[in-house]
Amino acid sequence: MTVKVRKAIFPVGGLGTRFLPATKAMPKEMLPVVDKPLIEYAVEEARQAGIEQFIFVTGRGKVIIEDHFDHSFELIEALKGRDKKVQLDSLSSSKFEPGQISYVRQQQPLGLGHAVWCARHLIKDEPFAILLADDLILSKVPCLKQLVHAYDENGGNIIAAMNVPPDQTSRYGIIEASKSKGNLHYIKSLVEKPDPSHAPSNLAVVGRYILSSDIFSEINNVKPGMGGEIQLTDAISQLIGRQDIYGLTFEGKRFDCGDKLGFLEANIAFALERSDLGDFRTVLSKYGG
Ligand code: G1P
């Protein structure tokens, strides 16, 4: 029997320099895809996977995220007064029960591993999920739910994975698998952002993880890696051989919303899914789409 995954970490401390000037005063996680901030898609996905405790690792300039997930009394009363039911319903996925959401600050941008480590006292000794909001995933079954399912069946640590073009390995953590069972790949080694000439494969890490709390002592010991940062990939790599670590090639399409083209494509793909935006196809066709 595995222990239920109840808690999720959302690292949202990054600077978002690739989206300046939009992200000068606004966190990149608040950029909307159609009409919903990126971070809210990640939160919805976590909820659908059974997550009950939401932990945000924030940084300077990110208080708007706290306001976004707070109860907005005046807005709700105004919408009720005007009988705006659709708009009221649209606020439901940013609503939390008291105590369900916590914020911890990463005081210095020392890397993803360090951001995750900042939440160690809130996770304690339970298995937990990590969701990177930049990775937006369109799928029938929410991606984290697919990971939870694999975790319930196999235990261990599960990382979302997908094949990327071989010339793009230097953008991702890259997995070397020793054996595969269906879409689950037993990880033999992991390397952060290798040059294509040194990459062990083109199976890349996508920003969804289920990890055991033993990762915290590994992060504690890990030396700064790629870019001088404390890398989560390096800490997971240290667990190999002591715990089972799997890559799961999930069903769905992932959009890199940390990149302008990926972000634009996500807007198109998500708009096309929306029944209330039926005219969007006509709009797109004007541009040869
Ligand atoms: C992070 C991880 C990397 C992973 C990627 C997925 O990198 O360090 O291993 O492949 O997310 O999006 P980042 O994109 O934050 O530099």
Image: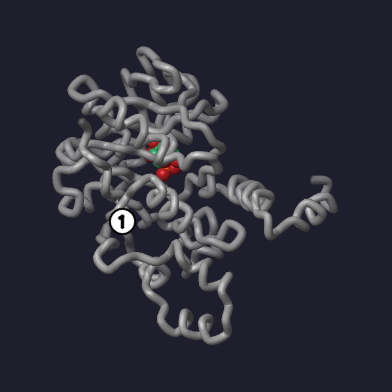
Q: Quadrant of the N terminus?
A: top left
Q: Is residue 263 above or below residue 247?
A: below
Ligand 1 neighbours mark 1 (CB distance < 8 Å): no
Q: Position of residue 211 (x, y in %)?
A: 27, 37
Q: Considering depth in this image, is 150 or 119 the residue closer to the camera?
A: 150
Q: Does residue 250 appear left or right of residue 130 in this picture? A: right
Q: Considering depth in this image, is 85 or 128 the residue closer to the camera?
A: 85
Pointer 1: what residue? Answer: 54
Ligand 1 is found in the corner quadrant, namely: top left
Q: In this view, does 174 lie above or below 288?
A: above
Q: Considering depth in this image, is 158 or 104 the residue closer to the camera?
A: 158
Write the residue at 22% across / 33% down. Answer: 2
Q: Where is residue 272 in the image (x, y as percent from the top left)?
A: 69, 50
Q: Considering depth in this image, is 214 or 141 the residue closer to the camera?
A: 141
Q: Position of residue 4 (x, y in %)?
A: 24, 41
Kindly state the secondary structure of the residue where label 1 is placed.
Answer: strand
Q: In this view, does 111 lie above or below 79?
A: above
Decide if residue 61 is in sight here: no
Q: In this view, does 183 lie above or below 51?
A: above
